[in-house]
Image (spheres, rainbow, N blue to C red):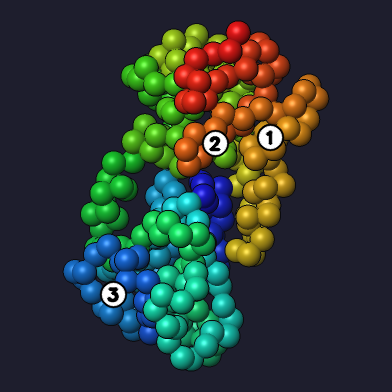
Amino acid sequence: MPELPEVEALAGFLREHAVGAVIGRIDIAALSVLKTFDPPLTELQGKDVTDAARFGKHLALRAGDLWLITHLSRGGWLRWVDNPSAAPPKPGKGPLALRIHFFTPEGATPAIDLTEAGTKKRLAVWVVRDPAQVSSIARLGPDALTVTELEFAEILGSTTARLKTSLVDQSLLAGIGNAYSDEILHVAKLSPFASSSKLDPESVAALYAAMRSVLSDAVARSAGQDAARLKGEKRSGMRVHARTGLPCPVCGDPVREVAYVDRSFQYCATCQTAGKILADRRMSRLLK
């Protein structure tokens, strides 16, 4: 799933390539992707693109008095197409969900493709006059890159949830998902199963510093990258996430995994849990 650094980079990419262009035809290849009907999608046509922005993990394009907002969800992505097909796509064929055609001041006619891999189709698109009209944006907590350390401490103190759960809860903190929460906890040397409200001040400070450094480094690596290269850039910077069985880059011990029905996360027992191996839901306890 694209998280804060990738969505921030995509917003930067769109500011560079789409701002100043005029929106042309919009093709819907998957009807389920559109979550609003008023204003209609066709009202975007003919409007100048004036900005691109990020709200948590939502990507937004502003055109006149309207916002086109998308959440790429788990398998979604954005592709910039310099020479799109003139023929409308056939609904239900392939990963394409939505295509937005542009007319640039230079006379080019590129397009944006919103695609989604896999069988679970969760990619969502809204057309609104105010981003806060999207309920998932209205519920967002402070952005992970702008929250202060004091606010961060108050957020953790307000919940008894495990640290892993708190970091990915968008109503508490916006922008962090499964992958970067693994990385942040590894850098902070904290257990994913630690109780958020029971952290001592030193651990809170270490977690905040880790969050800032991991996200800032990822944003810096992603900035200026072509949209097609962002996924590879994300994978290349990971220390523990999606590296089950590989050596931890800090201590050399194997990276371990906690698996659930439809997701998993990774950690280093030596660095983060004093050698204890965390049990997943299938065992629902700590292995001693």
Q: Position of residue 3 (x, y in %)?
A: 51, 47
Q: CA distance from mark 2 to mark 3?
A: 36 Å
Q: Earlier in the sequence, mark 1 or mark 3?
A: 3
Q: Are marks 1 and 3 in contact (CB under 8 Å)?
A: no
Contact, mark 1 vs mark 2 (Cβ under 8 Å): yes
Q: CA distance from mark 1 to mark 2?
A: 10 Å
Q: Secondary structure at mark 2?
A: strand
- Can you identify the residue that label 3 sits on? 41
Quarter of the rendering occupied by the C terminus: top right
Task: Please tell me the numbered disc located at residue 264.
Answer: 2
Residue 39 vs 52, above or below: the answer is below
User: What's the distance in space between the residues labelled 1 and 3, CA to CA?
Assistant: 43 Å
Query: Around disc 1, counting alpha carbons within 10 Å, would you say few (fewer than 14), some (14 to 19), or many (20 or more)?
Result: some
At label 3, counting other C-alpha atoms closer than 10 Å, the crowd grade (few under 14, some 14-19, many 20 or more) is many
Residue 146 in view, yes or no = no
Q: Amino acid at mark 2?
A: Ser
Give the quadrant of residue 225.
bottom right
The amino acid sitting under disc 1 is Thr
Residue lying furthest front in this view? 282
> Which residue shows up at 56% across the image and 52% down it?
6
How many numbered markers are drawn?
3
Mark 1, residue position: 244
